[in-house]
Amino acid sequence: MSKPLALIIVVLLFVSCKRDIVPSRTAYFPKAAVQPEDIPEKENLWVFILAGQSNMAGRGIVEPRDTIPSERIFSINKAGELIIAKEPLHFYEPKLTGLDLGMSFGREMIKQLPDSISILLIPTAVGGSSMTQWLEDQEFRDVQLFSNFEEKAALGKQYGTIRGILWHQGESDAATEETIGLYEQRLSQLVRKFRKVSGNDRLPVIFGELGSFSKNREQWKQINEKIRSYAQSDSLTGVVKTGDLKDKGDKVHFDSKSLRTMGKRYAREYLKIYRQSHDR
């Protein structure tokens, strides 16, 4: 074999191997949080609370594009301090947390809103948590679920106005016929609690469907039917479709590309409700 040909083969092998390298979960996590120099006026800072279980908490791989900041998108750190938002937003499960849909949601929102409006994304989702645990304010993975939501909502009110809740949950409740059967009723109860905490009985709440890739596909499908059924009874809710999205290979969690798509869809569902209510 000639030396030039051997060199070409080595280069091709190197390129091929490099393409197969998957970065570690934390490879592109920001090294430090940055606090804003200027905070928007309260009336110009729209607060959105991210709640639910692991697909809202985020299990995708964070890439450099996910850590590009915007002067109009904020979040909080574990100490409750306002920071410039970068993925990952959630911090409750440091050994699991990855890319969620928050930054994608925020970017889509600021594209559609006046330049004077900024977004504050507040993370409260905890992987594996069930509807009952949220309703009963149980402690799960060292987080008192609903108390933590109330605490973070109060924090959001200090900085701005709560404009909506982004909810993705149901995988845990798909485990039994009983929890599936009660899901719509419990979802209704939770939405009422969310609105009471927010101080706005017309607060929009956006739900995401469970993925179509589960090994328990029929049970997940039934949860999605419950979500859609409840949304039909509440004009201030929206449902994000996910049937065309992909998992990260574990049949449970959306991959990074799908999470970015979901964030955009959550924003569009929210804006649909917002525009309809302001056109009246």
Image (tube, helix red, strand yellow):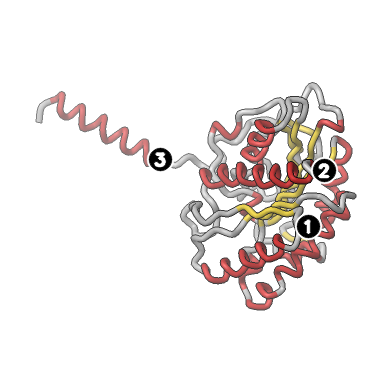
Task: Identify residue type, mark 1.
Answer: Leu
Residue drawn at point x = 87 percent, y = 50 percent: 200
Check disc 2 and report its element: helix, strand or loop. strand
State whether residue 125 appears in this view: no
Q: What residue type is labelled 3?
A: Ile
Number of numbered callouts drawn:
3
Please state which of residues 43 and 94 is positioned toward the viewer in this rendering.
43
Q: Which residue sits at x=68%, y=73%? A: 179
Q: Is residue 253 left or right of residue 41?
A: left
Q: Which of marks 2 and 3 is in front?
A: 2
Q: In which quarter of the image is the N terminus?
A: top left
Quadrant in which residue 123 is drawn: top right
- Residue 145 image label: 1
User: Mark 3 or 1 closer to N-term?
Assistant: 3
Residue that label 3 marks: 21
Alpha-carbon span between mark 2 and mark 3: 41 Å
Q: Earlier in the sequence, mark 2 or mark 3?
A: 3
* Front label number (3 vs 1): 1
Q: Which residue lies furthest to the bottom in this view?
A: 178
Q: In this view, does 165 lie to the left or right of 258?
A: right
**Picture residue at 68% right of the left edge, 41% below the top:** 89
Q: Quick one: label 1, few (<14), some, or many (20+) residues within 10 Å?
A: many
- Residue to which mark 2 is pinned: 162
Q: At numbered mark 1, what does the secondary structure look like: helix, strand or loop?
A: helix
In front of the other: 141 or 134? 134
